[in-house]
Amino acid sequence: MPEASTGSATANPPRSLAEALRARDDVALAALLHARPDLLNPVPGDVTQLATRAGTRASVVRALDRLDRFALQTAEALAVAPDPCPYPVLESLLTGGEDEAARAALPRALGTLRDQALVWGDEERLRLVRTARELLAPSAQRPSPTGLGPTVAEATAGMSPTRIQEIVAAAGLPATHDPVSAVTALTGLFTDPERMSALLDEAPAEAHQVLERLVWGPPYGEVTPNPTPPVRWLRDRGLLLPATARTVVLPREVALHLRGGLAHRRTAPLAPEVGAHREHRPQLVDANAAGQALAALGTVEELVKSWEHAGPLVLRAGGLAVRDLKRAASTLDTTEASAAFWVELAYAAGLLAGDGEADERYAPTPAFDGWCELPPAERWSALASAWLPATRTAGLVGEQDAKGRTLSALGPDLDRSAAPEVRHRVLDLLADLPEGGSPDPDALLDRLAWERPVRGTSDLRARLAHWTLTEAEVLGVTGRGALSAFGRALLRGLDPAPLLSPLLPEPVDHVLLQADLTAVAPGPLRRPLGDTLAVLADVESKGGATVYRFTPGSVRRALDAGHTAVDLHAFLTEHSRTPVPQPLAYLIDDVARRHGHLRVGAASSYVRCDDDAVLGEILADKRSAGLGLRRLAPTVLAAQAEPGALLEGLRAMGYAPAAESRTGDVLVARADAHRTPARSAPVPVPDGPPVPDATLLGAAVRAIRAGDLAATAVRREPAPSGGGDVPAPGELPRTSSAETLATVQAAALTGSAVWIGYVNAEGAASQRVIAPVRVEGGFVTGYDHTADEVRTYALHRITGVAELAEDQV
């Protein structure tokens, strides 16, 4: 058998977790700290502190959450096994003597538990740490995944001695003198296969049916005050024991006999395979992913630009209102769930944020302008690099939190610290497949559930994995479900832009004008052309080729932005590969001829027109009643409405008014793009303490070893005349000031090491081993073996000093 769990028993087996950890070498101790980084905050003073911290509830829960299914099943089996548990007993609980796969996987699982400091002891006395046993052991309030119930001793606790003796007699056992020996005898009966089989052979057939319903759990069943004969037969012989006044429980020993000694109905010793469900040509995968990447760039740019003039308000509690999310979804022509993802992605990339004003609104950040100027592949790399480590989870938008409040996009409660780990793990599994291979999503979810099976943890991970697959596809990290070449580079921490750039089409500098007042862009447009065309026309459809439609409203929008009819004709002529269609030229001229014929200014507001007949038409139109118009002069109408509302009202009536300044000039309606102050992208919320690097691990191990030396070093016996006792391990030495000074001076002269107790300025007490080299001015300077450096200590803060045995330092 592997060395991890078999071999001869050690001559001096560890008596505690601290002794087991102390016996580890530095590499194994560093591996523990790497696997459980919460143990490093702060660095334990010695191995005893490390063992104590490793047994705390919060730390053990975190460690259990990170076990795979079979390692967790092994821990669950140890929780229902005798304490301590011999290795053969544990093996029998998991294999039943027949499951070869479980037998082969058990050493690995047990090694994982040992490495995580959840199990200690040799193979003859395996012990699950007490906190883990308390968490995994079955109880009425917290059923175990094993489906087992309490032991006979636990189930009979509090039962009257007379009732216990009645059960013993009904089971055919001799009477005993006390309840403890009676329970022991009953337990011995239930754990003896031959006698137990003989007892069950006497049971009625209906009693076996009752046992079959309880044997694999849950082990509790309800009974009436007058139970049926089969239930009464089982209860009288202790095969069912009372749990409450209305429930009975199947004792653990009985269930294990009926199960053939198995702790679990099914074990999962092997991780589910994630194979290639479909295979595609890698070139096709990359091309498909590149198309999605290009579409993602357009979507993010369109979204952020739509917020640069009048972005949505920030809710008082933070986040985006539902109506604003719906408006964003309409702008992007997508679902609200998809819009939430794009909003969160732009936010994670630092492209939009709140502007910090009194009436705070979301707006593009200054970083958005720099992002727009980057080559497309680099822009995508910035988005994908922000998505992969992000803890904000767009999939939660629209759900409710624990207090029943709806979670909103850009809100404060969307961080899930497990999200980056799940994304990386999903992409790792995709990367393990052959290039072009895509998995069955169900198989991938099964694998993730095996790797983190703890209920609650696995549920969240499954949802995160599902969202990861969807988001990776729409973002272009994957194509047709398979990881793209530039997606693999992203996963490895490399720059994906060089791999993506050749797959993206070059921006074009022309469009194709058509007679139906549309223009077709055969690819992504160069920025000046695309920006101007976006003002002059409305996007009608997107895809490999974008279709723009010219309308009176879109042409008027260009005129409002300061363009003239001559400018628009020249622009179209320059950038169209086809002649400008006559209907489009007529549309531009017709809108331009009427544009500015009416003038709206800010008196309260007014309408001015050289043609008084037009003003008469407006006054006679019933639709103008809400504007509060009245004639001030043959060519001037006054209005109660604001200039903006007056402009919109007249346009709705079919006119084409233009705003004018106080000097009477046409006012260009091009609003300046609003930007927030400089903002940094949101920082992901870590999942617990960060994983320590090799330097920190090495320093932590040295500090723990040195602290352990100080705490466990053997002190020299005091001289008969010296007085005082040798301090017990863990206790600070206590000596007088004169004795402390004399001892450290003598150590400085002889070059020997001493053990001191020290209280720093903050009142924290510690034990240290130092080799004094100088004692003067109320301070002692020497080499501190605990800190592995030369330090100076105030003599008045030394609680006491003791000499070390000659073989200690």
Image (tube, rainbow, N blue to C red):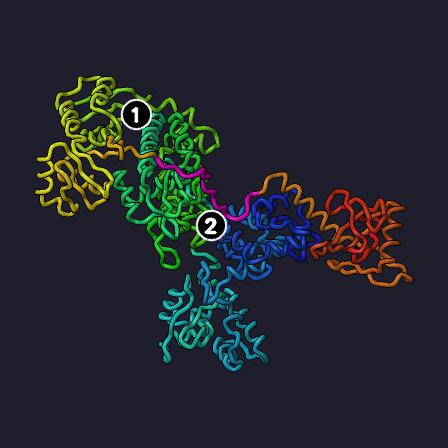
Looking at the picture, tell me which residue is in the foreground, 14 or 130: 130
Residue 69 disc label: 2
Residue 446 seen in this snapshot:
no
Amino acid, disc 1 = Pro
Q: Nearer the viewer, mark 1 or mark 2?
A: 1
Which mark is drawn over residue 713? none
Residue identified by numbered label 1: 524
Q: What secondary structure is marked by label 1?
A: loop
Residue 301, picture quadrant: top left
On the image, the x and y values in percent for residue 786 come to 74, 47
Nearer to the camera, 17 or 208: 17
Which secondary structure is most common in the magenta stretch? loop
Circle 2: is it few (<14), some (14-19), or many (20+) Cα within 10 Å? many
Q: CA distance from mark 1 to mark 2?
A: 49 Å
Q: How many marks?
A: 2
Left-right relation of 365 to 606: right
Q: Amino acid at mark 2?
A: Arg
Residue at screen point 25% across, 38% down: 333
Pick the front one: 375 or 565: 565
Q: Position of residue 331 (x, y in %)?
A: 26, 39
Which region is colored magenta? 673-691
> Extreme bottom residue here?
162
N-terminal label among 1 and 2: 2
Q: Is residue 118 above or below residue 531?
A: below
Q: Secondary structure at mark 2?
A: helix
Up/down of 327 relative to 661, above or below: below
Left or right of 463, for residue 553: left
